Image (spheres, rainbow, N blue to C red):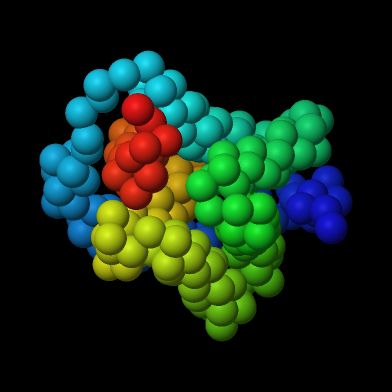
């Protein structure tokens, strides 16, 4: 399954669908960002102290995986917005990152769980493309449907993680983490497609800060759940 629409359709989407995307998403993005901004400190306070090399290596590896996630997402947005020839290669690298994240949890939760997380995260990427494609028609119903599917997938990712580690990854907090990630990524895409480059850069700073908190929540949760693995 490819996530790359034909070049002509991508350009048409950028030109004809931008207004619909902006109108359909800005209010949701703004409200989500406000909700998330008061949520950062709780997760920062939950971090465990790093006492040894194993903990530090795992903490840093988790951050690297999620930094790759937002970096390759950003590069894909930029390539899409400007119809750059590197888009297929960038998309392939972005999808590989979802496999990397799934593989990272396999030593703790098993191969089936890691593969399931990869599948959910790939749906997260494909769902973002579907939302943008829906904007081409300018049909508010289609845009709303694709948006609802994308956010439903975000809740599914959060619930899956909660099920693996309910004590350290409470469902409400995981859902808030994922929703904030979607809100901020969506704002980043809207501003880039709209040519609001200064805002787009600020958006990425928000995305980056938030994803580090999310990565720390995940690594902390695993270290607390499997303490003997990190002695």
Foreground residue, 20 or 187? 187
Q: Return the residue nearer the eye: 36 or 162.
A: 162
**Residue 167 seen in the figure:** yes
Which residue is at 45% across, 43% downward? 188
| Res. 203 visible in picture | no
* Count of all numbered marks drawn on residues in the image: 0
Residue drawn 71% across and 34% down? 93
Q: Tell me the quadrant of the picture where the N terminus can be found.
A: bottom right
Q: Is residue 68 left or right of residue 13?
A: left
Residue 129 drawn at (x, y percent): 66, 57
| Left or right of 84 in this view: 65 | left
216 shown above or below 168: above
Which residue is painted at 48% across and 65% down in the image? 160
Q: Looking at the picture, how far across and down is residue 141, in whole percent?
A: 56, 82
The residue closer to the viewer here, 120 or 91, is 120
Q: Residue furthest bottom?
A: 141
On screen, residue 197 versus residue 88, left or right, reads left
Q: Quadrant of the C terminus?
A: top left
78, above or below 56, in the image: below
For this orientation, the residue located farthest to the top is 53
Query: In which quarter of the view is residue 113 placed?
Result: bottom right
Q: Nearer the viewer, residue 117 or 203?
A: 117
Residue placed at 42% from the left, 67% from the top? 163
| x and y, in percent, of residue 132 in the image | 62, 59
Residue 112 image offset from top left, x and y in percent? 66, 59
């Amino acid at each position: 399954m490819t996530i790359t629409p034909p070049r002509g359709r991508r350009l048409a989407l950028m030109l004809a669908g931008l207004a619909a995307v902006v109108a359909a998403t800005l209010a949701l993005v703004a409200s989500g960002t406000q909700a998330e901004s008061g949520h950062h400190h709780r997760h920062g306070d939950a971090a465990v102290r790093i006492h040894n090399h194993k903990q530090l290596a795992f903490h840093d590896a988790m951050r690297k995986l999620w930094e790759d996630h937002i970096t390759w997402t950003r590069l894909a947005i930029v390539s899409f917005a400007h119809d750059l020839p590197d888009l297929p290669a960038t998309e392939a690298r972005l999808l590989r990152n979802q496999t990397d994240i799934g593989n990272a949890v396999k030593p703790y939760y098993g191969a089936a769980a890691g593969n399931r997380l990869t599948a959910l995260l790939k749906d997260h990427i494909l769902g973002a493309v579907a939302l943008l494609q829906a904007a081409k028609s300018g049909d508010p119903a289609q845009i709303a449907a694709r948006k609802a599917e994308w956010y439903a997938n975000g809740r599914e990712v959060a619930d899956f993680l909660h099920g693996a580690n309910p004590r350290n990854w409470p469902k409400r907090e995981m859902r808030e983490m994922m929703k904030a990630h979607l809100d901020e990524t969506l704002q980043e895409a809207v501003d880039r497609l709209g040519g609001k480059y200064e805002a787009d850069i600020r958006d990425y700073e928000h995305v980056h800060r938030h994803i580090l908190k999310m990565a720390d929540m995940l690594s902390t949760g695993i270290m607390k759940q499997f303490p003997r693995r990190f002695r």
